[in-house]
C-alpha cells in the first residue's frame, strides 16, 4: 500500500470522481492475525487515504466493517438472538472507526466519526447534512455503526451512506488478495476468470461475490457505480481515481 505522504494538503489533480465513498471491511483491520486490530495495517490504510487526498481534488468518506471483532451472523449461528448479535457487530465497527480516525489524524487529516447509534462522548451522531458539510470542509468522514438497524450488513450501510452524501462511486476494498469479481471463487476454482466489468443484474442473477443483494440493488436503483478492488495492493486507490482500469466495475452497462 501507499507510503505516508510528505504533504497532507488537498491535491489539485482532477479525479475520475469528485466525491468517493470507500468501504473497508473489518477483516482488513486484522491483517494476518485474523482477529483484532493490526496497527500497521490501519496505519497503511490511513496512509492510502491520505495519499489519494494529497494528489486529487476529492472529498472522501469511509464506511468500516467490524468482522475482525464480531460478526452478527456468527453470534446468531451460535444461538444468540440475531438482532442482539447485530447490535454487537455495530459496536465493533465503532472501534474500527476510532482506530482509523486516530491514524488519519496522526497524518494531519481532519476527520470526523459519525455513528448510526448515538454515543456522543466518542463520536457524532449521523446527521446527513452535517456529514456533507464536513466533506465540503475537506474532512474525511468515517461512518460507523452500520445502518443502526439489525439484519443489514455494512455493505448495505456503505451503499446507503454513499447515496445519502451524493457520492459518485462506491469503492469496495478487499483484503484477501482478491482483486475483483470472478466467475467463481478463485480460491476454490482454478478455472475462475476475472471480470473487468459487470452489470448489477449479473451480480444479482449470477450470485457473484461482490456486495450483498440489498446493497447491490440500492446502488442499481440510484445508478451508483461500484468498484471492487484489492485495497492492500500498492497504489490501487490512486490508480482508480486517475481512471486506470483496476478491479471490477459494476454499472448498469458493461464497459
Image (cartoon, rainbow, N blue to C red):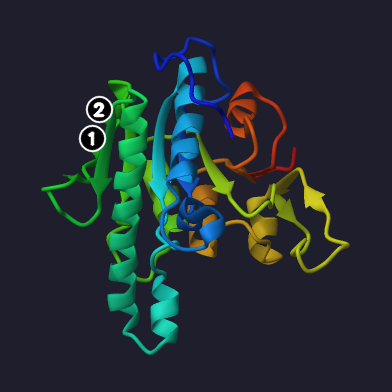
**Left or right position of 52 against 197:** left
Q: Which residue, given by chain and number where applicable, does mark 1 sit on?
A: 129
Instruction: Give the camera-side residue of 164 and 143.
Output: 143
Taking the spot 52% from the left edge, 16% from the top edge, the residue there is 55
Quarter of the figure with the N terminus: top right
SS category of the residue bearing label 1: helix
Visible residue check, residue 56: no
Quarter of the figure with the C terminus: top right
Image quadrant in which you'd find residue 100: top left
Taking the spot 29% from the left edge, 46% from the top edge, the residue there is 98
- Note whether 221 is above or below 170 in the view shown: below
Percent position of residue 66, x then y: 40, 59
SS category of the residue bearing label 2: helix
Percent position of residue 175, x then y: 59, 51
**Left or right position of 71 against 51:** left
> Are the residues flagged by discs 2 and 1 in contact, CB closer than 8 Å?
yes
Visible residue check, residue 159: yes
Instruction: Give the camera-side residue of 152 and 2.
Output: 2
Number of other residues with Cα within 10 Å of mark 2, as a class: few under 14, some 14 to 19, many 20 or more: few
**Left or right position of 182 against 111:** right
Mark-to-mark CA distance, 2 and 1: 6 Å
Q: Which residue, given by chain and number where applicable, does mark 2 sit on?
A: 133
Instruction: Give the camera-side residue of 31 and 72.
Output: 31
Taking the spot 55% from the left edge, 20% from the top edge, the residue there is 15
Amino acid at each position: 500500500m501507499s507510503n505516508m505522504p510528505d504533504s497532507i494538503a488537498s491535491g489539485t489533480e482532477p479525479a475520475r470522481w469528485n466525491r468517493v465513498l470507500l468501504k473497508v471491511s473489518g477483516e482488513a483491520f486484522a491483517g494476518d492475525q485474523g482477529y483484532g486490530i493490526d496497527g500497521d495495517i490501519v496505519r497503511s490504510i490511513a496512509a492510502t487515504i491520505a495519499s489519494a487526498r494529497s494528489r486529487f481534488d476529492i472529498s472522501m468518506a469511509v464506511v468500516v466493517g467490524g468482522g475482525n471483532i464480531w460478526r452478527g451472523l456468527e453470534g446468531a449461528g451460535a444461538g444468540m438472538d440475531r438482532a442482539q448479535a447485530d447490535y454487537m457487530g455495530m459496536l465493533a465497527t465503532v472501534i474500527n472507526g476510532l482506530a482509523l480516525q486516530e491514524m488519519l489524524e496522526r497524518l494531519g487529516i481532519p476527520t470526523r466519526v459519525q455513528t448510526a447509534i448515538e454515543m456522543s462522548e466518542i463520536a457524532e451522531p449521523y446527521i446527513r447534512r452535517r456529514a456533507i458539510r464536513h466533506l465540503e470542509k475537506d474532512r474525511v468522514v468515517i461512518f460507523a455503526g452500520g445502518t443502526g438497524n439489525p439484519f443489514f450488513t455494512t455493505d448495505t450501510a456503505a451503499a446507503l451512506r454513499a447515496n445519502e452524501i451524493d457520492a459518485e462511486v462506491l469503492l469496495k476494498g478487499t483484503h484477501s488478495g482478491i482483486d475483483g469479481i470472478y466467475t467463481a471463487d478463485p480460491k476454490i476454482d482454478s478455472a475462475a476468470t476475472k471480470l473487468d466489468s459487470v452489470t448489477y443484474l449479473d451480480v444479482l442473477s449470477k450470485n457473484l461475490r461482490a456486495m450483498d443483494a440489498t446493497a447491490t440493488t440500492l446502488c442499481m436503483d440510484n445508478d451508483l457505480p461500484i468498484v471492487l478492488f484489492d485495497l492492500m495492493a500498492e497504489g490501487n486507490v490512486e490508480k482508480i481515481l486517475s481512471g486506470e482500469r483496476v478491479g471490477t466495475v459494476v454499472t448498469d452497462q458493461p464497459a
